[in-house]
Amino acid sequence: MDGFIELRGIRKKFQGVPAVDDASLTLNRGEVFSLLGPSGCGKTTLLRILGGFETPDAGRIIIDGQDITDLPPNKRPINTVFQNYALFPHLTLWDNVGFGLKMAGRPRKFIDSEVERMLDLVDLLDHAEKKPHQISGGQKQRVAIARALINKPQLLLLDEPLAALDLKLRQRMLLELDRIHDEVGITFLYVTHDQGEAMSLSDRIAVMNHGKIEQIGRPMEVYEAPSSSFVAAFIGDTNFFKANVSASADADYSRLSIDKLPPVLAYNDKKLQTGQQVYLSIRPEKFRIQREKPSDGERLNMLKGKVLDIIYLGSNTKFRVECGGHILMITQQHARFMLDTSPLTWEEEVWVSWNADDGYMLQRYEEADTRLLNLPAEEPVP
């Protein structure tokens, strides 16, 4: 794939407050790219700038070599699917989908052919004569997508398109979006605050925070190797430990000292030196929890702890375990039939273990993230 959409140094303020702060990214032709972040992080503003609904204070937008920064929305090769779908309530689904082509003065035969093709693509041809109030939320969303795609844009913007749907319907619609994208092959820019949506649908993700892009990468890269504590905390759950590099075990691994815990071994991909401060992030599913002490293994870390809380969720169980004054979040997947086992109980003493490769060291840490992490809120931050 080749990069054909570029946002260069985009800035936008509202009443003096930065909404987008020097955002730059490149979208590849035909990919699904997601802007992910909490409410107010600037992702929708960036989408509206790209769509032409907001004017940037600085920066340029390039599509396929053409600068479109100053073009109005109707002159850009871009269409948008909004959160509320914006369907015309008095028109049938057929007329909603064909509205753009009709306004463009295209021949009736051509319009009918394209509308039929689009409604068939979104599996709504049998509902063509219904009006929006006669169909479900998921069907409305598919009509909005069909209406956006019929003009054959180079880029489709999707602004929180599943936010109004219930969980089961969102999951089904994600599969539908993936299928539609595979069939039409154009670039999708998907805006969401839901990490699950972004992770399951996207080829790449940009995580935003306070108007800035914190990290861009494939879902696996962003999850396994976050660039900051914000990304580590926002993408899934994580356990954080403030540590110091106490010694080098070999060329690639270092021993870390953590308050009230025995030395911990971690992969030192950043080549930090003895004495440097670091924050160790460990995902809940990386831990193993068991009654018996594990056999010593190469690069295996072990802690003794006590179970504080157990949450059974069917496919997995979540534990809160206290180890040396640190509260760990642990997820245990249920790969075997659970009724034949003796489950762990509250207040039970356990062993927690993880491989040195499964901890990820970070040098950046933001105080505002303590509400998401397991560091105490009053912990001094460098």
Image (cartoon, rainbow, N blue to C red):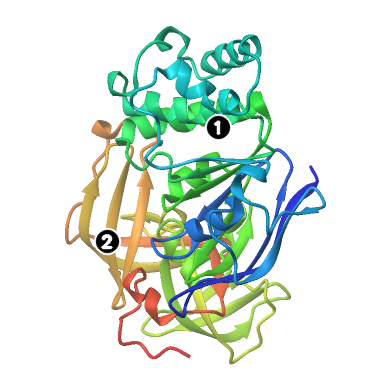
Three-letter residue code for mark 2:
Arg
- 214 horizontally vs 90: left or right: right
Secondary structure type for disc 2: strand
Secondary structure type for disc 1: helix
Q: Residue 166 versus residue 115: which sits nearer the camera?
A: 115
The reply to whether residue 336 is visible in this rendering is no
| Residue 328, image x, y percentages | 33, 66
Q: Quadrant of the N terminus?
A: top right
Task: Give the distance between the C-alpha atoms of the residues marked 2 and 1, in whole angstroms.
Answer: 46 Å
User: Label 1: which residue?
Assistant: 148
| Residue 44, image x, y percentages | 48, 56
Q: Residue at x 43, y 45 (%)?
A: 160
Examine the rendered structure and indicate whether residue 41 appears above or below residue 316: below
Mark 2 or 1, which is nearer the eye?
1
- 196 horizontally vs 327: left or right: right
Examine the rendered structure and indicate whether residue 307 appears above or below residue 258: above
Three-letter residue code for mark 1:
Ala
| Residue 28, image x, y percentages | 73, 46
- 179 horizontally vs 261: left or right: right
Q: Residue 173 versus residue 316: which sits nearer the camera?
A: 173
Crowdedness of circle 2 by 10 Å Cα count: few (<14), some, many (20+)? many
Q: Residue at x 59, y 62 (%)?
A: 225
Q: Quadrant of residue 118?
A: top right
| Residue 187, image x, y percentages | 66, 40
Q: Residue at x 50, y 78 (%)?
A: 279
Q: Residue 194 versus residue 124: which sits nearer the camera?
A: 124
Q: Residue at x 49, y 28 (%)?
A: 175
- 4 horizontally vs 139: left or right: right
User: Label 2: which residue?
Assistant: 320
Q: Residue 55 versus residue 274: which sits nearer the camera?
A: 55
The reply to whether residue 93 is visible in this rendering is yes
Upstream in sequence: badge 2 or badge 1:
1
